[in-house]
Image: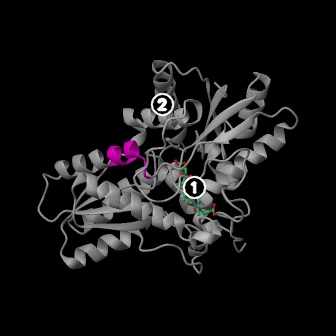
Amino acid sequence: MNYDALLWLSFGGPEGPDDVMPFLENVTRGRGVPPERLAEVAEHYHHFGGVSPINRLNREAIAAVEKELAAQGIELPVYFGNRNWHPMVEDTVATMKADGVRRALVFPTSAYGGYSACRQYDEDIARARAAVGDGAPELVKLRQFFDHPLFVSSFADAVRAAHAQLGDAEGTRTVFTAHSVPLSADVTSGPPAEGGNRYSRQIAEAARLVAAEAGVEGYDVVWQSRSGPPQVPWLEPDIVDHLDALHAEGVTSVVVCPVGFVSDHLEVIWDLDNEAADRAGELGMRFARAATPNGDPRFAELVAELVREHTAGAQARKLSAFPASGGTANGEPCAAGCCEAVKRPS
Ligand SMILES: CC1=C(CCC(=O)O)c2cc3nc(cc4[nH]c(cc5[nH]c(cc1n2)c(C)c5CCC(=O)O)c(CCC(=O)O)c4C)C(CCC(=O)O)=C3C
Ligand SMILES: [Fe+2]
């Protein structure tokens, strides 16, 4: 085998009240997020005792992946590193070097393209290697997986289960949601030759695939967790505004599917399970939120299969016509100018 480890690369989240502000400062450094927004998001974390579930969920997913790899006879130790909170990826890559790791695969915990979902993880890889310096392991990122059949079927079952929870009410609307990004960031997502908007087009494609497999007809794609200064346009409509619009149309029952995320981290348990669910309650709408895939055994199988694309020549299974992007070495972009960062006003 050409690889001697797997690095699980994620966003990171606070693990106690004192972590919240330093974590948020790490996330927003140079990103032009106003202090009012930061204070609001800090409150969301404090609502849960300053603990984001994301690190625990990643550790659980890693344990499942370790078991799956072992069951398949793939001997790869799994390391865990984050962009914004401990264990920081720079420290993890230093440990990998000290352990003698020379060439590792990297699983980023995002299924999509775009700056925040793909390219920024490349920057993390390059920064961590630079911090470690000579002898840093070679780091080869696994590709985007938004259209992988295991990812799609996991969400499809979750959507079906959420409909069943509502007793399959006639006319229940399925609403797919993903993290909003500035319009400018969506426009520059994907390789320039493709014409942009790769992030929102991949989200729309994943929603279409999940809806088709779940057998739901009426569905919408909306956005959530908008950040940044109010004057900067982001992808819309927002999920909460959309519930108002659905109510005005006479919809009385909704299933919300967070197709843009792999786990029940803070944007899911606060922005959906509290804010959106409360709004639905005020409007007298029935509301069920579909589960995210990381607790599903198919998620560990998916990661193992992406690994086997590199170690055993496994065929890249995918359901959309988008090219299999994102799998580059040492933080290289997929193409010149692909998903480049947009400067934010400070
Ligand atoms: C596309 C996308 C994903 C999905 C892809 C992926 O999963 O990577 C994602 C995931 C996540 N975002 C997260 C948390 C935050 N994101 C923020 C801010 C921002 N996100 C953005 C985009 C995305 N974010 C953007 C364009 C900003 C504005 C600042 C900037 O331009 O960078 C802020 C700052 C405060 C605020 O919300 O304003 C926080 C705290 C957490 C961890 C949650 C937890 O702790 O459980 C996760 C998984
Ligand atoms: Fe975010």
Point out the stretch of residues depicted in magenta: 147-155
Residue 177, image quadrant: bottom left
Q: Is mark 1 within 8 Å of ligand 1?
A: yes
Mark 1 to mark 2 CA distance (whole Å): 21 Å
Residue placed most toward the observer, 173 or 38: 173
The earlier-in-sequence mark between 1 and 2 is: 2
Residue located beneath label 1 in the image: 117
Q: Is 295 contained in the magenta span?
A: no
Q: Is residue 332 visible?
A: yes
**Residue shown at 60%/54% (left/top)?**
118
Q: Give the residue at mark 2.
A: 60
Classify residue 239 by image quadrant.
Answer: bottom left
Q: Is residue 275 visible?
A: no
Magenta: main secondary structure equals: helix
| Residue 42 picture location, percent across and down | 57, 55
> Residue 61 in the image: x percent, y percent?
48, 33
- The residue positioned 46% from the left and 27% from the top of the image is 64
Q: Tag 2's secondary structure?
A: helix
Indicate the amino acid at tag 1: Ala
Q: Residues within 10 Å of mark 1 (few under 14, many from 20)?
A: many
- The image position of residue 122, as x and y in percent, is 68, 50
Compared with residue 334, is residue 304 higher up or lower down, i.e. above or below? above
Q: Residue extending furthest right?
A: 134
**Viewer-nearest residue: 7 or 201:** 201
Q: In the image, residue 35 lies at what x, y percent?
A: 65, 66
In the displayed structure, 68 sits above or below 194; it is: above
Marks 1,2: beta carbons within 8 A: no
The part of the image, by quadrant, that contains residue 1 is top right
Along the viewing direction, whichever of 181 and 51 lies nearer the viewer: 181
Residue at x 71% of width, y 75% of height: 345
Looking at the figure, which quarter contains the C terminus? bottom right
